[in-house]
Image (tube, rainbow, N blue to C red):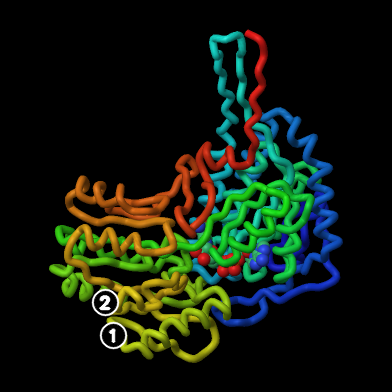
Amino acid sequence: MTPIRFNTDFTLTLDGQGVTAGEHFDVLDPSTEERLAQAPDASLAQLNEAIAAARRAFPGWRDAAHATRQAALLAMADRLQAHQEPFAQLLTNEQGKPLADARAEIGRCVHWLRSFAQHTLPVAHYDDGAGHRFETRHVPLGVVAAIAPWNFPMTLAVWKVAPALLAGNTMVLKPSPFTPLTALKMGELFRDILPAGVLNVLSGTDRLGPWLTEHPGIDKIAFTGSTATGRRVMQSASARLTRITLELGGNDPAIVLPDIDIAATVPALFWGAFRNSSQFCLASKRMYVHASIYDAFARAFVDYARTVKMGRGAHPDTQLGPIQNRLQYDRVRDLIADAHRTGVRFLLGGDVPEGKGYFVPVTILDNPPDTARSVVEEAFGPVLPLLSFTDTEEVIRRANDSEYGLGASVWSADTEAARAIAARLQCGTVWINHIHALSPEVAFGGHKQSGVGVENSIEGLLEYTNAQSISVPA
Ligand code: NAD
């Protein structure tokens, strides 16, 4: 393998080759707003070529021994691990997140590839006692379109690449135009591990997503992004009944019961809400705190928040980086302006300083009404409402009163009481007294408007397959 230059030469991976495009678009460093690089803007002809290459590669990859695909995933994990540091730096540069978080993200990608490599596809047998023996196996779908967002560009790409390829599919991966660089380098990194056409990586501007999801050569769309875009993806998929997995937005409640140890719990609750500058589908976005401890909790929470350092991701002291792009920065500023307009009290923040970089200081709101935009909408930025509640039935109702249903957390000295609440929350994942533990072995997905289907675990793997039952005379 020729050594990779991480700051330049960003090319598409198309049928196993590095290819440039006729046009390019700028990728900015969100902490300076300066141009970091130019990424190729794939044309429709190049997308057609990539899909054709993926279709050509499919029969060979599907029919390869399962062990061959497992070995490929392990080789990808090793290769990525060997390049963890330059990938982490590139991720920080394009996404803005602190370098420690970027390193952790690459580390998780390595872990996910290795874990998926252990899986085999289950085969079920059944004898109906009436002369028929059934065998149900799982066969790959064909060409997968994988579409990733800008908040965890590597993680949310690898969550799709690993299971899709292991199951025997081929892929066209499209990163967000805001953060295409790490995905392009990942395509380059894996070029000589995978047969040509198995993994194609195409960056492009806003036209590329719809071209991809509407393309007749796609058999499955694995999408992570906003609920609004998810609906459009589902609409495109309906034309040909293209299979879909949609991981969408969230507005996760954290429920804080009166018996918690405030000092011991505040840091975990803070990071549950603000890690990645709250650009996290699973961030706590509404924090319900029992009225009897509300004031003491709010004081401790704000005191802790004041100790946290925001800045350029590459700076070693930085704990929170900027918002990733201008569009999202403007949305978050608008949410803050709305809170000012409607008379919400700010416990912290509320002013967004002028200057280069999309920095929004940690903003904590004091008990806005349930109808406030900051409570109803997914902020996807460091703006958190603290909300006071008095009884369990009430807080369960308010927590469930959302179109979203991605995650939630419950915090109490009484784990059984917290479990009882967890069981009644309408969402895909609930953490008790901790938050954001995720595993390649555990199904992850949204209820309600937060998604369709799951990622991770055997269940997530099987979403890249069709079941096929073969019946033979017993
Ligand atoms: P987005 O929906 O704007 O974009 C996501 C991806 O879809 C990008 O690659 C984008 O280029 C592409 N895209 C845009 N329009 C498209 C179209 N019409 N057809 C096909 N593709 C199209 O989302 P975003 O702003 O990048 O990400 C933030 C959102 O993602 C938040 O709502 C967040 O909660 C959600 N998210 C969900 C999860 C999860 O697992 N549930 C994880 C991370 C982020």
- The tag earlier along the polypeptide, 1 or 2, is 1
Alpha-carbon span between mark 1 and mark 2:
8 Å
Q: Amino acid at mark 2?
A: Asn
Q: Which residue is mark 2?
A: 367
- Of residues 21 and 431, the one nearer the viewer is 431
**Residue at image point 57% right, 80% down:** 326
Q: Is residue 36 above or below residue 140?
A: below
Q: Position of residue 429 (x, y in %)?
A: 39, 50
Q: Quadrant of the C terminus?
A: top right
- Tags 1 and 2 touching, CB below 8 Å: yes
**Secondary structure of the residue carrying numbered label 1:** strand
- Of residues 169 and 79, the one nearer the viewer is 169
Q: Is residue 247 above or below residue 275?
A: above
**Residue at image point 47% right, 44% down:** 443
Q: Which residue is mark 1?
A: 345
**Residue at image point 32% right, 56% down:** 409
